[in-house]
Image (cartoon, rainbow, N blue to C red):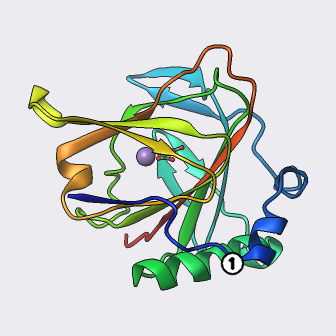
Amino acid sequence: MFQAAQNRKITHPECFWRCQRSRWYRLQWLSQGRVRVYGKVHDEPRLTCYCGDQSYTYSGKTMIPLPWSEIPVLQQIRRLVQKATGETFNSVLCNRYRSGEDTNGWHADNEKVYDPQPTIASVTFGTERDFDLRQNGGRPGKLRIRLAHGSLLVMSGSTQEQWQHTLPRRKGLSAERVNLTFRRIVF
Ligand SMILES: O=C(O)CCC(=O)C(=O)O
Ligand SMILES: [Mn+2]
């Protein structure tokens, strides 16, 4: 299923210091990405960037990676996350939610580039937001997790096959949040 490991010790003072807002601004955030959903093109309600070994395509969009060597802080966090989870990751998708108006709609991380039962490690910096999960096919079972600054959420096993997740809109919230989801692309 999934394993919530909030506030698990992935922190390292140096690493956290580097993750302060001003540093994140230096990431080459894609200006707002555009994504195709059911044949229609929309602006994504958040900023994203992708760092990894290979390019890949999702929702009609080809993600060209920034090389790890350009963003040493991501390398450092990857090492900490690998140590905490015992898994290896070759890519990270970074989401920047500029305020409560920025969101991530219901989806599963089940693209063909991942293992059918992938382990995805999600690290949060900045303001705390709700993260909701629901079972597929209208089956009962809904979960809400508060993802706090410095938390690590590990989704594994059949989570992506049987559940969807979302980061809901929060009207009136002006604070920013950065989320890093570490993944392993297998092709
Ligand atoms: O921001 C989050 O916590 C979720 C991110 C997410 O689900 C994704 O990038 O696929
Ligand atoms: Mn996701």
Vertical arrangement, residue 104 with respect to residue 160, above or below:
above
User: Looking at the rendering, which quadrant does residue 48 occupy?
Assistant: top right
Q: From the top left corner, tell me how far across and down residue 180 is, in percent.
A: 59, 57
Residue at the image point whose x is 73% and y is 65% from the top: 66
The residue under label 1 is: 75
Vertical arrangement, residue 20 with respect to residue 75, above or below:
above
Check disc 1: other Cα within 10 Å, few if <14, some if 14-19, many if 20+: some
Residue at the image point whose x is 91% and y is 52% from the top: 22
Q: From the top left corner, tell me how far across and down residue 131 is, in percent.
A: 43, 38
Q: From the top left corner, tell me how far across and down residue 107 is, in percent.
A: 36, 37
Q: Nearer the viewer, residue 156 or 145?
A: 145
Vertical arrangement, residue 7 with respect to residue 45, above or below:
below
Q: State which quarter of the image contains the C terminus.
A: bottom left
User: Looking at the rendering, which quadrant does residue 101 occupy?
Assistant: top right
User: Looking at the rendering, which quadrant does residue 133 occupy?
Assistant: top left
Residue at the image point whose x is 60% and y is 29% from the top: 44
Q: From the top left corner, tell me how far across and down residue 69 is, in percent.
A: 78, 79
Instruction: Tell me: 149 left or right of 37.
Output: right
Q: Nearer the viewer, residue 14 or 109?
A: 14
Q: State which quarter of the image contains the N terminus.
A: bottom left
Q: Residue furthest top?
A: 171
Residue at the image point whose x is 68% and y is 14% from the top: 172
Instruction: Tell me: 180 left or right of 139.
Output: right
| Element at label 1 | helix
Q: Nearer the viewer, residue 40 or 20?
A: 20
Instruction: Tell me: 16 left or right of 115.
Output: right
Q: So how many labels did they put on this image?
A: 1
Q: Nearer the viewer, residue 65 or 151?
A: 151
Q: Is the residue at mark 1 in contact range of ligand 1, meaning its CB lies under 8 Å from it?
A: no
Disc 1 marks a residue whose amino acid type is: Gln
